[in-house]
Each structure stands twice: as structure tokens, then as C-alpha cells.
């Protein structure tokens, strides 16, 4: 019997194909998105140095104070605003967007649009 790959395995394969081409550096770090059923996470990463510069997620106290859920579009928008605010405070205004193998739709698109509206360029 042939084993059918699950959705997460397929997503990881897509992400590996994308990561071959997308690299973040000091000038334009990579903004990587990960979403689970209940939360959404985003990191801004300098791949040449191998360092995570900024993180934001739906588990942070600033997010919890807004009483939103990380599993919906409104929560993703708030996380996008948070990451953009943190990035601009550190002087990062241009990033390369890495959707993590997810379809650019729903929470991933809402996070990206909110980050753009808050001042990030990608």
C-alpha cells in the first residue's frame, strides 16, 4: 500500500523549493511566516549571519492584551502590525517575504498586507 503524504509534508517540500531561491541578508532580511491552527508566528532573519533579528507571534503579551485569536485573519493582521513596528524600530524597512510554503491567502495574506500598511516594503 502506498503511503499518501500529509499536508504538512507537502508544505515543507514547497518551502524547501522556495528557500533555494529566497535568501535574507543584512540589507533585506527574510520575513518567514509559520501558522498553526491556533497561532501565527513571524521571524525576520538574516540568513548570511544565521541570526533571527526580530520575532512576533500571537503568544506575545501585546497581542494578548488585544484579546484576539491567532487562528483568524484579525489576529494575523495584529501580528503583522507588531512585526512591522518592531522592524521599523530597529531600522529595518525592507524585507524579503517567505510565506513558508503556505498559500498566499487568508491569514498569511492578512499578515503581509498589515505589515506593508505599517511601513515594511517587500
Image (cartoon, rainbow, N blue to C red):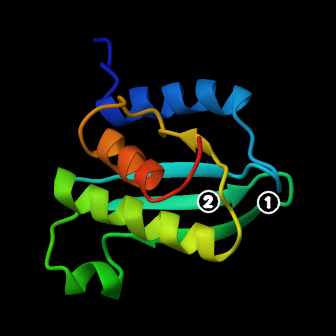
Residue at x 30% of width, y 65% of height? 78
Q: Which mark is residue 44?
A: 2
Q: Does residue 109 sit above or below 10 in this rendering?
A: below
Q: Residue 94 at x, y = what percent?
A: 67, 50
Residue closer to the observer: 51 or 81: 81
Asked whether the viewer can see residue 105, the reply is yes
Location of mark 1 (residue): 50
Give the quarter of the figure containing the C terminus: top right
Give the quarter of the figure containing the N terminus: top left
Q: Which mark is residue 118?
A: none
How packed is label 1: few (under 14 Cα within 10 Å), some, or many (20 or more)? Answer: few
Left/right of residue 43 with respect to residue 112 in the rendered view: right
Residue closer to the observer: 46 or 89: 89
Considering the numbered disc 2 on the image, is that residue within a helix, a strand or a loop?
strand
Residue closer to the observer: 58 or 95: 95
Q: Residue 35 at x, y = what percent?
A: 34, 51
Residue at x 36% of width, y 36% of height? 8
Amino acid at each position: 500500500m502506498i503511503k499518501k503524504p500529509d499536508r504538512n509534508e507537502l508544505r515543507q517540500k514547497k518551502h524547501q523549493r522556495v528557500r533555494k531561491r529566497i535568501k535574507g541578508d543584512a540589507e533585506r532580511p527574510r520575513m518567514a511566516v509559520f501558522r498553526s491552527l491556533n497561532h501565527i508566528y513571524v521571524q525576520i532573519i538574516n540568513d548570511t549571519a544565521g541570526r533571527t533579528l526580530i520575532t512576533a507571534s500571537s503568544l506575545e503579551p501585546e497581542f494578548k492584551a488585544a484579546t484576539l485569536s491567532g487562528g483568524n485573519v484579525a489576529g494575523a493582521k495584529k501580528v503583522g502590525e507588531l512585526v512591522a513596528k518592531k522592524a521599523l524600530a530597529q531600522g529595518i524597512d525592507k524585507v524579503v517575504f517567505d510565506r513558508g510554503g503556505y498559500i498566499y491567502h487568508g491569514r498569511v495574506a492578512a499578515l503581509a498586507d498589515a505589515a506593508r500598511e505599517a511601513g515594511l516594503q517587500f
